[in-house]
Image: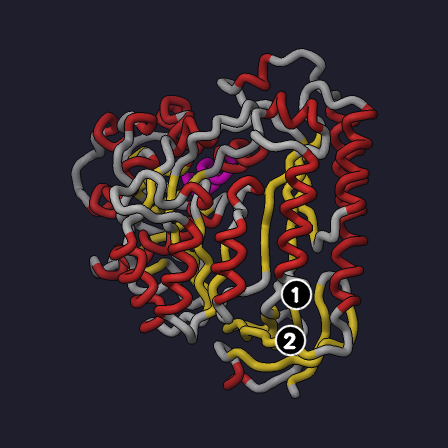
């Protein structure tokens, strides 16, 4: 009888890519995904630790799934597992496997093994990792869009961030493997590929062959002209003229950027160890807008960092108000033990952080509405998802990342079709197939 597996994924696109690889490997080993309500034989939890809330959610998920599947073998991986392996080991009873980020390629084998796991072997020393985990897959689930992880790890050590300690140094996947994975995704019918990583702009700098993210984008777009490509979050100092030229040459690169700002105040940026100032960020966003007038430009902003007073917050808000951006991802500062910022004085009270988050999120909604309004009564190419929304509408994203819903036949799923954008309804733009 086939073993039944559940994979629960928290956190970033890299975790989602890795979980999709686990799924393929389990299926190739003769397992199947457990149906809703079924008791699982194996439960995999791919955790996150980017904020204290994410860590708390990871612990809650582990406890919930252990209660729900008391007879299952529990396999815990991801960033929270990397930073809190001992705590997790004390939370659960055997059989349990805790697999570090540097050994995710061993996860499925460990999960299927009848014997107990060797926790030392499976954790390893992530900061000494020399090679990226190889996690190929046939397909990215039943999705129209696939994530392709081309890089892992980070060398920046921003003062608030735990990720370099849980993911290790920046490591890149070699071009041959990336091209092979892109080919598999195309053969599986995926129409869009999102290049992702923990610090994707560092791609290629650790490889023997000379390469960078601009070269990679150009090569992939030229090799797969029928696939739409996007780039996940990229640091502002890595958006070079070369990168913008490569993107503009490729007709199948989608006009969409996601750029972390974190603070619009120069003093806070220095304390964060971000490596740029507000003027650099403004210049980068303006260059992106000039090169791609229709681009969606998303911005990450972290408010409530230690020492952020009213003046520093006002500087951030002023810069965000000025920029021609599309949406914001706003986060309150979250103290992570083991990071320098956790020891800084002038910690901002929780109530003040929450008030500032609410203010910036409201500004972000105004920006998003203005961007969507700009494209009403125009046509945009939309990749139609394989599922309908609650109202029975087909859904998808335009080339410039506008979420669209419209009536249509099921045979349109998985296709790229022109949609006339008509009106805004909450967080979606309603349209019609023309």
User: Mark 2 Cα within 10 Å, few/some/many (few <14, many 20+)?
Assistant: many
Give the magenta-colored segment's residue range.
Answer: 60-66
Which label sits on residue 402?
Answer: 1
Query: Could you tell me residue 272's position as x and y percent?
Result: 60, 25
> Residue at 42% of width from left, 41% of height from top?
202
Is the residue under label 2 in contact with that under label 1 (CB below 8 Å)? yes
Q: Is residue 330 magenta?
A: no
For label 2, the residue is 380
State whether residue 421 appears in this view.
yes
Q: Is residue 221 left or right of residue 270?
A: left
Which secondary structure type mostly characterizes the magenta part of the structure?
helix
Whether 85 is drawn above or below 364: the answer is: above
Query: Could you tell me residue 398's position as x and y percent?
Result: 61, 70
Q: Nearer the viewer, mark 1 or mark 2?
A: 2
State whether residue 76 appears in this view.
no
Whether 173 is drawn above or below 345: the answer is: below
User: Mark 1 Cα within 10 Å, few/some/many (few <14, many 20+)?
Assistant: many
């Amino acid at each position: 009888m086939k073993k039944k597996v559940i994979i629960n994924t928290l956190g970033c696109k890299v975790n989602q890519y890795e979980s999709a690889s686990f799924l393929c490997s389990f299926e190739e080993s003769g397992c199947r995904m457990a149906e809703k309500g079924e008791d699982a034989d194996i439960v995999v939890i791919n955790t996150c630790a980017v904020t204290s809330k994410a860590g708390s959610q990871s612990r809650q998920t582990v406890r919930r799934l252990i209660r729900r599947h008391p007879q299952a073998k529990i396999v815990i991986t991801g960033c929270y597992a990397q930073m809190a392996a001992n705590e997790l080991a004390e939370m659960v009873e055997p059989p349990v496997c805790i697999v570090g980020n540097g050994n995710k390629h061993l996860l499925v084998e460990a999960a299927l093994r009848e014997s107990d796991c060797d926790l030392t072997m499976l954790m390893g020393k992530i900061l000494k990792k020399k090679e990226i985990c190889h996690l190929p897959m046939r397909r990215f689930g039943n999705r129209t869009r696939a994530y392709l992880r081309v890089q892992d790890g980070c060398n920046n050590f921003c003062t608030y961030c735990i990720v370099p300690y849980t993911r290790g140094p920046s490591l890149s996947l070699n071009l041959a493997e990336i091209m092979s994975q892109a080919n598999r995704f195309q053969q599986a019918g995926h129409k869009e590929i999102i290049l992702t990583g923990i610090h994707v702009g560092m791609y290629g700098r650790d490889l023997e062959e000379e390469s960078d993210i601009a070269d990679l984008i150009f090569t992939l777009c030229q090799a797969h002209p029928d696939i739409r490509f996007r780039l996940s979050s990229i640091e502002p100092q890595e958006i070079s003229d070369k990168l913008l030229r490569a993107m503009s040459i490729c007709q199948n690169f989608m006009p969409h950027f996601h750029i972390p700002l974190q603070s619009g105040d120069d003093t806070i940026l220095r304390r964060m160890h971000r490596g740029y100032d507000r003027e650099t960020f403004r210049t980068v966003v303006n260059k992106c807008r000039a090169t791609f007038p229709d681009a969606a430009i998303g911005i990450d902003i972290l408010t409530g960092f230690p020492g952020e007073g009213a003046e520093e917050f006002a500087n951030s808000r002023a810069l965000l108000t000025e920029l021609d951006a599309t949406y914001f991802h706003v986060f309150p500062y979250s103290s992570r033990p083991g990071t320098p910022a956790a020891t800084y004085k002038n910690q901002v009270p929780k109530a003040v952080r929450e008030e500032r988050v609410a203010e910036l999120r409201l500004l972000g909604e105004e920006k998003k509405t203005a961007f969507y309004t700009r494209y009403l009564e125009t046509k945009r190419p939309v990749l139609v998802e394989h599922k309908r929304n609650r109202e029975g509408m087909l859904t998808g994203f335009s080339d410039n990342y506008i979420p669209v819903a419209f009536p249509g036949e099921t045979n349109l799923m998985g296709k790229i079709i022109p949609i006339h954008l008509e009106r805004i309804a909450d967080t979606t733009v309603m349209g019609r197939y023309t």
